[in-house]
Image: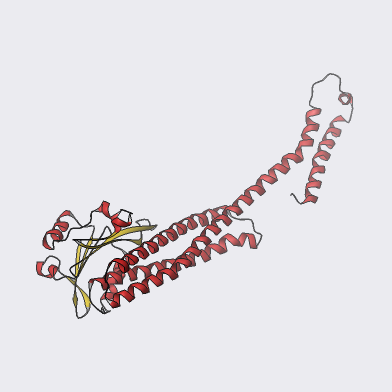
Amino acid sequence: MIRAFSLNNERLISVDETVSDQLNNAMWIDLIDPSDDERKVVEHLLKQPLAEEHELEDLEASARFFEDEDGLHLHSFFYCLDDEDYADIATVGFTIRDGRLFTIRERDLPAFRLYRMRSRREKMMDGNAYELLLDLLETKIEQLADVIENIYADLEKLSRVVLSAQENKEQPNNDTFDDALSDLTELEDASSKVRLCLMDTQRALSFLLRKTRLPNNQLEQARDILRDIESLQPHNESLFQKVNFLMQAAMGFINIEQNRIMKFFSVVSVMFLPATLVASTYGMNFEFMPELKFHYGYPMAIGLMICAAATPYIYFKRKGWL
């Protein structure tokens, strides 16, 4: 899919990408999982080579941030959700050439949808490709801030679930803890992806500040975004640590409950060992046993077994092991 936008009265408006003149005058060419024919349209009509899918996935800085005869290129990670609503990241390729911004990505992303909605009512200050690029990165950081807030709210709920058993001295529910551990695993994954997106954006902005001559307004805008990133990183790091703490606490409570169960069975086993010894002794088949002819031998053996079981029980009860 190709979306094209031009500047009209300092606002971005969508134009018909099938009309050559309108596409040539577009300020922003946005490609979403483009087909081979759509790639040819951009490459032949606008003379702009597009990054291939394998190029977008490269992690080396030299392959993600560079400038050549085809323009300025940035490949940046964007936070999103997959088809099953799990945290995921998608790479977006940015290219600025001759005052025009090209973006290529595999899927529609929340940050892009939000920016398109804003562009309908908000005016651009300078109306250049660098401002458009920085606006998209700024929207991305705002989305990541919202994700961090959501993670914090979810962690507050899970904290009550995990810590309530210890505070109230209640027996923990393993099913509840299993669900909590599953949720914590998802939150840890989301937090790690947020951190990756923040670090990646920080690298991209540092490259822009070092290697390009940004206009004054965009220079200050890039620095503002960097300051926002620096303020979000400690918050995200603290959430990451809290997730790990809650996971360890939940696992600790589960281990305590399992140890309590094993302790109970161990004490019960030890409690019946003397009774078993008595029963085993009088279960022997020797010919000469003094108690075999004793009229009250059977009640005596039963009494001995009861006493042998009761004595450890009373001792363990006083010790608080039961």
Q: Which residue is drawn at 59% across and 55% down?
A: 173
| Residue 310, position as x, y percentages in the image | 81, 43
Relative to 228, is 27 on the left or the right? left
Numbered-mark total: 0
Give the image quarter of residue 210.
Answer: bottom left
Relative to 85, does residue 321 appear above or below in the rendering?
A: above
Q: Residue at x 81, y 46 (%)?
A: 315
Relative to 22, is 199 on the left or the right? right
Q: How is this picture coloured?
A: secondary structure
Q: Which residue is drawn at 17% across and 68% down?
A: 98
Q: Residue at x 67, y 49 (%)?
A: 260
| Residue 37, position as x, y percentages in the image | 14, 56
Relative to 202, does residue 310 appear above or below in the rendering?
A: above
Q: Residue furthest top?
A: 287
Relative to 39, is 278 on the left or the right? right
Q: Which of 259 and 143 is in front in this view?
A: 143
Q: Quadrant of the N terminus?
A: bottom left
| Residue 147, position as x, y percentages in the image | 42, 66
| Residue 48, position as x, y percentages in the image | 16, 61
Relative to 233, is 251 on the left or the right? right
Give the image quarter of residue 13.
Answer: bottom left
Q: Which of 36 and 202 is in front in this view?
A: 202
